[in-house]
Amino acid sequence: MKKIFILYLITFSFLNSVNAQSVKDIVGVYNLRGGTHFLKPDQTFVLVGYATLITGKWELKEKGLVHFIPDYEKEKFTLYGRHNKNATDSTKIMLSYGFYDDETLLHFGPLKKPVPEFKRVFKPGHRHISFPYVYRVKGNSDEVSFTYFPYEYDGKRTKQPEIYTFVNKEKFNDFIGFYWRVKNDNQPFYYQFKNDRLYSDEDTYSQKNDLANALEEIEADFKTLVSESNSTDFSPKKMYSTPLYNFYDAGSEELLLNFKFNEQKNAWLNILNYEQDEELSPDYDYNKTNIVFEYTKVEDFKKTNNAIKIDEVPVFISPYAD
């Protein structure tokens, strides 16, 4: 009985010490699961791994549990548009990398009732199609719709998939579409904090390192990135792209400092480096950012669930046999 009582006291004391942890105690830098975790005093975090940067919020729960909530795009599809003066009688859309991740389909124009028809973007399994994925159709469309089926091992599909229909009030004829698949990186996760250590499981942990000291030891650009990255805006109001869809991430101040808007081209031209009509060259360099197009997020959309018919001939066809 005495041993049981002592064990109870030890357990009770441990839980009290864990519960006594504060946000201030946990702020620091930890190396866990192949990534460096920067936990900041405002309870945001930056996780840096190989070719990965994840931002989000963290919360201290009971018994030293630390809840990490990564930032993610809450909508499955986002759409951006612009007016392309070189394509007045047609519409083009670039379907970003994400459309490869699941079984995705699209439709231009009003949806037919009661069963709308969608065109497949890629044939499942095709992985040899060169970027950028640009699709052109005749005429202009007042609506652009997308739907999807997540790739599943058992091959089952929902009978009424979720449909996103974007209303093209601005009469754009040049689009960029994004599909946001739910990934492991998006999922909330828990670690346990005790004795100045952060545990991902009972045998794997990282000792806390001082945040300020760690930031002083890294290069200036990376320090700024970590310090200022409090959240990730996956779908800003505006986005910028070169003619070959190299996305340009500069802020508005940098854009105004280095570029001037050209009404004729409906584009931003680099003040010092742009050469007249350079983008028309057949060997135009993907990495050149002397001209960038401004795309505006299409905010007006609705979501519905409905049975669909599928045009099985995909938009993009692999040059290689199955």
Image (cartoon, rainbow, N blue to C red):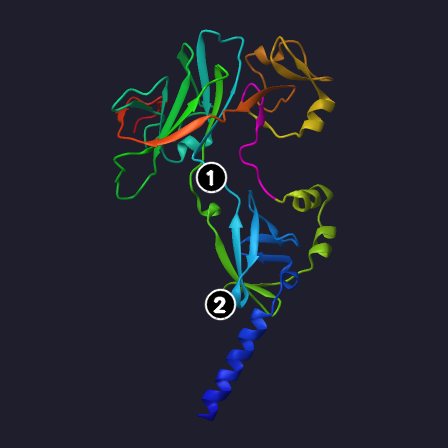
Q: Is residue 141 left or right of residue 207?
A: left
Q: Nearer the viewer, residue 310 or 207?
A: 310
* Quarter holding residue 152: top left
Mark 1–mark 2 Cα distance, whole angstroms, equals 32 Å
Q: Nearer the viewer, residue 177 or 304?
A: 304
**In the rendered view, would you say 49 is above or below 11?**
above
* Magenta region, residue range: 231-245
Q: Tell me which amino acid carries mark 2.
A: Glu
Q: Nearer the viewer, residue 127 or 35?
A: 35
Residue 270 lies, in percent from the top left, at: 69, 18
Work out which residue is located at the far bottom of the displayed protein and give it: 2
Dominant SS type (magenta): loop
Q: Earlier in the sequence, mark 1 or mark 2?
A: 1
Residue 213 lies, in percent from the top left, at: 73, 56
Q: Is residue 232 left or right of residue 41?
A: left
The residue beneath circle 1 is: 74
Q: Residue at x 53, y 12 (%)?
A: 84
**In the rendered view, would you say 192 is above or below 212?**
below
Q: Please identify, in this view, whether the residue under mark 1 or under mark 2 is nearer the observer.
A: 1
Quarter the N terminus occupies: bottom left
The residue beneath circle 2 is: 202
Q: Which mark is residue 87?
A: none
Name the element at disc 1: loop
Quarter the C terminus occupies: top left
Q: Is residue 277 left or right of residue 86?
A: right
* Quarter holding residue 100: top left
Q: Tell me which amino acid carries mark 1.
A: Lys
